[in-house]
Amino acid sequence: MKKQITLFTAFILLISAGIRAQNVGVGTLTPDPSALLDINANPANNKGILIPRLTATQRLAIVSPANSLLVFDTDSACFFYWNAANSAWKSLCNTGATGPAGTTGNTGSTGLTGSTGPTGIAGTTGNSGGTGETGATGSTGLTGATGATGASGNTGTIGSTGATGNTGSIGTTGATGADLGTHWTITGNAGTTPGTNFIGTTDVADLAVSTNSAEKMRVTTSGNVGIGTSTPDPSALLDLDASGANRGLLIPRLTTAQRNAIVNPALSLFIFNTTTNCFEAYMGNGWYTVSCPCTPPPTPGSITGATCVSAGQSGYVFSIASVTGATSYTWTVPSGSSITAGQGTTSITVTFGTTAGNISVTADNSCGSSTAGTLAVTLTYISCQAILTANPSSTDGVYTIDPDGSGALPCMQCNCDMTTDGGGWTLVLNYLHQGNTNPALRILTDSLPLLGNTTLGNNESGTLYWGHASNSLMTAITFAELRFYAKTSAHSRIIHFKTQHNGTINYFRTGVGDATGIQSGFTSLSGHTAFVPASAGSFFGNQGDLSMTAFPYYLASTYHWGIKGIGSRWEVDDAANGSMFDTYHQIWIR
């Protein structure tokens, strides 16, 4: 107890006198040479040091905080220090990245209200007692007579003042007595012996130190030292309470070079490195960072991946470039979709549900999460049939589909026939040809023709309504049925039938083989009056991307299906007409 009082009181006196102490020990007679202040909890090792505790409001009210000023914020229960390089308070709490919030569960039903118990019967009121009679008032006694005042005596005369005597001479100053060694002087002392000579108490009483008649420090009889408090916490050797003054604790501030110049640093020696703006501690085999300015990573760059996806399809990949400072990544996907691989990394694989939305990702580290990078995703289906299945009330019109799901093809617009023969037809070939013209065909590899004018005599060549799907595009689209429609100004017969003939379907997908057999494997639809395909006896084969246009079936020199066949023939259930007539050809799939 005496050791602690003596050393810490000496420390306070040194501070008060403006002396730069080299080594000060609290709880030790031999402070470590590497420390300005060595707080030693020996022998019990059951006390710590209390850093100034402030609310967030008090912390923010500190005027011009010094670089590395340390406080404990009681609102957030975290240590904060002032980082002058960033002009900001930095938390020493290393909070991990927050995961995505889970879906809020449904509110449970309200329980039944219990019945109200019966009200008890009120008891009867008792009878009031009668008022007693008032007693008679006694008579008032007589007032006695006042006695007479006696006469005043005469005042005596004042005597005269005597003369003042002369002042005597001042005597000589006596010799200075011997210093008994029992007092401390205010100009310093010599000949003291630590442990024998001390400032403090010898009875069971705390030692208080005051300035301007106000207590500033106290050392309790248990050896607890408080600055700013008269009741230091029993668990702390040193309790710094600055809540009333809005101040913190300054840890020794050294550059890296100055830190490295410390001779034989003690285990756990604590400093603030002004070169790196980091708190550091010596752990026996080197200096370790305790805390540095903590900053979440920057926002991730653009997300690479499909911007439209098919409902219920899997295998979609989304990715970003690595983000500097990130240790992990948190992805979120639209409701109903799921991440099947890659969560926490720069690339994920997703299976989509039936809801559109955003793909989002944050870059994370121990300081927190970045602002999210997002990619808006439009939900589509792989075909018109899939759209109709999901939404039976769908009408004819233009829709967006993703034919190969998570494959390489982009989403594309198409025309859907949702009424003919049950609907669900996707247009894959559309040529409205004007007579006496012979325009080039348009083979589509990543788009489909749209439905424009349907009146003979119009010319749609060179527009987005003109063209047909390539073999590769037909392969990418899932279908099991074909529908043919055609008419011409040369006659009134109309081709309109459907077929599930596998040979024809495979031929249109691959361009290899032919349509032999379609003549006996089709169903006529509304308005069909043509001779083909029933009369077909010949079939061009191995036409590649021209499999749907170059006479896939015909009766030689009589009834043909031809779209710029052999370079110039536009024919609908007729033959040898060249390009002189208006024609209109369509092929649909489902």
Image (cartoon, rainbow, N blue to C red):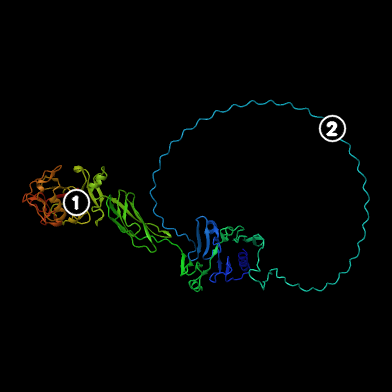
Q: Which mark is residue 428?
A: 1
- The x and y percentages for residue 499 are 14, 46
Seen as rendered, the residue at the extreme left is 557
Q: Residue at x 11, y 43 (%)?
A: 529
Disc 2 or 1, which lies upstream in sequence?
2
Disc 2 crowd rating (10 Å Cα; few below 14, some 14-19, many 20+) is few
- The x and y percentages for residue 569 are 10, 54
* Of residues 574 and 114, the one drawn nearer to the viewer in this rendering: 114
Seen as rendered, the residue at the extreme front is 43
Mark 2: which amino acid? Answer: Gly
Q: Are marks 2 and 1 in contact (CB under 8 Å)?
A: no
Q: Secondary structure at mark 2?
A: loop
* Of residues 307 and 266, the one drawn nearer to the viewer in this rendering: 266
> In the rendered view, does 210 fall on the left or right side of 249?
right
Look at mark 2 in the image and give the residue it sits on: 141
Residue 193 appears in the figure: yes
* Of residues 172 and 358, the one drawn nearer to the viewer in this rendering: 172
- The x and y percentages for residue 145 are 89, 37
* Residue 195, quarter of the rendered image: bottom right
* Of residues 469 and 521, the one drawn nearer to the viewer in this rendering: 521
Q: Residue at x 43, y 38 (%)?
A: 111
- In the rendered image, the quadrant that contains the N terminus is bottom right
Disc 1 crowd rating (10 Å Cα; few below 14, some 14-19, many 20+) is many
Mark 1: which amino acid? Answer: Val
